[in-house]
Image (spheres, rainbow, N blue to C red):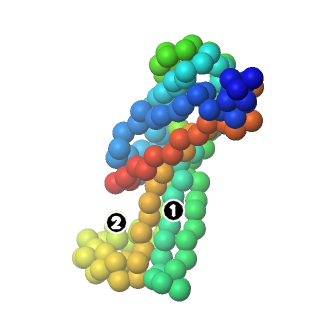
C-alpha cells in the first residue's frame, strides 16, 4: 500500500539530471547534452520537455524589474523504460536564440564604448542569468520529476 502511494507521488521514482556544458556560446544555435534518468523502482518515462530560460534583471531595490524569456524549448515523446538502479541517458539537442537589447548590441559592436557601457549596466543593476529546465512525464505518477541547473552564456 505504501509503495503504491510513493509511486503515485513520485517518491523513489525517476530522478532527473542533466549532462550539459557549464558554459554555452550565445553565437551557437543549439545546446546538446544528455538527460540522465535513475530510479529505485522500474518506471516508464513517456515524454520530455527541455527549456533554456533567461532571467533578465534591471534596477535596484523597489524599482527592480525582472523578466523571464524562453530562449529555446523542445518537447519530444520518447518511451524510456528505466529499470531499478539503472542509469539511462537520453541525448537531446535544444535549439535556442538569445536575444540582445540595443545596449548589448552597441557593447558588442563598439569597443570604444564597451567599458562605459559595462559600467552603466553595473550601476543600473542589469544582469542576465540563464537556466536549463527539464521535465519528464512519467506513467503512473501525479507529480512529474523535474530538474533545473544554471548555465553561463558567453
Q: Secondary structure at mark 2?
A: helix
Q: Nearer the viewer, residue 152 or 61?
A: 61
Position of 24 relative to 63 (above/below): above
| Residue 23 on image: x %, y % | 34, 46
Could you say which is closer to the camera, residue 150 or residue 44?
A: 44
Between disc 2 and disc 1, the foreground one is 1
Q: Is residue 58 left or right of residue 77?
A: left
Depth check, front residue: 64 or 144:
144
Query: To which residue does mark 1 refer?
Result: 55
Farthest residue to the bottom: give it: 62
Q: Quadrant of the N terminus?
A: top right
User: Judging from the image, what secondary structure is the residue with disc 1 in?
Assistant: strand
Q: Position of residue 143 (x, y in %)?
A: 70, 38
Q: Is residue 102 above or below residue 73?
A: below
Give the labeled residue for mark 2.
Answer: 108
Q: Quadrant of the C terminus?
A: bottom left
The reply to whether residue 139 is visible in this rendering is: no
* Viewer-nearest residue: 110 or 74: 74
Give percent across and percent down for residue 85. Answer: 49, 16
Residue at position x 40%, y 49% from top? 151
Instruction: Give the residue drawn at x 26%, y 71%.
Output: 111
> Marks 2 and 1, how far apart in space?
20 Å
Residue at coordinates 42% horizontally, 33% vertically from top-left?
A: 19
Amino acid at each position: 500500500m505504501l509503495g503504491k502511494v510513493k509511486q503515485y507521488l513520485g517518491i523513489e521514482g525517476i530522478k532527473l539530471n542533466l549532462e550539459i556544458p557549464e558554459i554555452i556560446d550565445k553565437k551557437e544555435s543549439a545546446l546538446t547534452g544528455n538527460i540522465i534518468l535513475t530510479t529505485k523502482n522500474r518506471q516508464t518515462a513517456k515524454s520530455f520537455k527541455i527549456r533554456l530560460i533567461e532571467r533578465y534583471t534591471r534596477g535596484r531595490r523597489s524599482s527592480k524589474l525582472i523578466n523571464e524569456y524562453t530562449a529555446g524549448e523542445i518537447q519530444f515523446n520518447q518511451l524510456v523504460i528505466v529499470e531499478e538502479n539503472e542509469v539511462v541517458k537520453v541525448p537531446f539537442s535544444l535549439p535556442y536564440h538569445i536575444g540582445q537589447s540595443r545596449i548589448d548590441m552597441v557593447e558588442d559592436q563598439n569597443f570604444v564604448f564597451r567599458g562605459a557601457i559595462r559600467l552603466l549596466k553595473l550601476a543600473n543593476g542589469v544582469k542576465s542569468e540563464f537556466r536549463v529546465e527539464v521535465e519528464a512525464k512519467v506513467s503512473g505518477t501525479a507529480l512529474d520529476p523535474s530538474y533545473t541547473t544554471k548555465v553561463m552564456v558567453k
